[in-house]
Image (tube, rainbow, N blue to C red):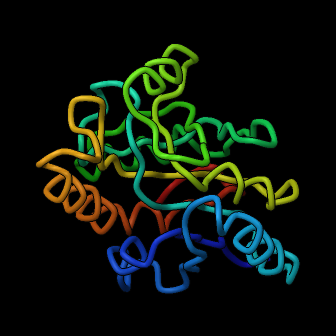
């Protein structure tokens, strides 16, 4: 096993990472692509070339903080098939803080639809920091290989997807992904340190 498998759901997320993570695998986003994405991840991991799975992309915060452009590093991924613990959360969060990012560590909830209002509040009451539509499903395909998810915040309850600032906030999240590239590339589930 040589390195990590970096997976990004959306093409725009892949483009934001650019050359910083050249081997990142684009798998598609959302529940309609869950089965195919999970199969792609499983096939890539079955080749035995990877010692960890890193899911990278954007997310929605379920509280007013984190703010758009901040990073959420998952401590666990909650999804339709259960909860997957993450490896190296604290080390990655520290590396991103050293790189000047606003960083929050905690659970990310994977859902099959966009959430807002009362549903965001319910997820926050359950301890989630953020919500996405892929991470837990992709992590469930890892089959015991260490997993970590790092998501940049594009929207919050105060700055929802259907708001005037969504484009600005989306670009802020993508700039954060680009800037986070070196820290992401340094994740090692074996040493649990980030370079």
Q: Nearer the viewer, residue 16 or 48?
A: 16
Q: Residue at x 39, y 71 (%)?
A: 13
Classify the position of the N terminus by image quarter: bottom right
> Does residue 48 appear to the left or right of 40 in the view shown?
right
Between 143 and 131, the one nearer to me in the picture: 131
Camera-nearest residue between 148 and 171 = 171
Residue in the picture at 46% in, 71% down: 10
Q: Position of residue 165 (x, y in %)?
A: 13, 49
Image point 54% across, 47% down: which residue?
A: 113
Residue 25, compared with residue 99, is above or below; it is below
Query: Where residue 86 appears, x then y in whole percent?
Result: 67, 43
Q: Position of residue 93 (x, y in %)?
A: 44, 42
On screen, residue 63 above or below 14:
above
Location of residue 125 in the rendering, given as x and y in whole percent from the top left corner:
51, 13
Among the 4 quarters of the image, the one containing residue 145: bottom right
Q: Quadrant of residue 28?
A: bottom right
Q: Residue at x 65, y 65 (%)?
A: 32
Q: Is residue 135 left or right of residue 21?
A: right
* Extreme residue toward the top, this view: 125
Q: 158 or 99, which lies in front? A: 158
């Amino acid at each position: 096993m040589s390195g990590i498998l970096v997976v990004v759901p959306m093409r725009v997320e892949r483009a934001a990472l650019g050359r910083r993570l050249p081997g990142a695998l684009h798998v598609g986003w959302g529940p309609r692509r869950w089965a195919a994405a999970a199969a792609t991840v499983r096939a890539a991991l079955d080749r035995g070339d990877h010692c960890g799975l890193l899911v990278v992309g954007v997310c929605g915060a379920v509280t007013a903080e984190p703010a758009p452009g901040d990073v959420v590093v998952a401590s666990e991924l909650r999804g339709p098939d259960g909860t997957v613990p993450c490896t190296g959360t604290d080390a990655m969060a520290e590396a991103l803080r050293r790189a000047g990012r606003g960083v929050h560590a905690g659970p990310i909830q994977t859902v099959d639809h966009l959430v807002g209002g009362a549903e965001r509040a319910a997820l926050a009451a359950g301890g989630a920091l953020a919500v996405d539509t892929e991470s837990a499903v992709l992590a469930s395909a890892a089959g015991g290989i260490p997993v970590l998810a790092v998501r940049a915040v594009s929207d919050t309850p105060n700055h929802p997807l259907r708001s005037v600032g969504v484009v600005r906030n989306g670009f802020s999240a993508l700039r954060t992904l680009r800037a986070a590239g070196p820290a992401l590339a340094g994740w090692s589930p074996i040493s649990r340190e980030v370079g």
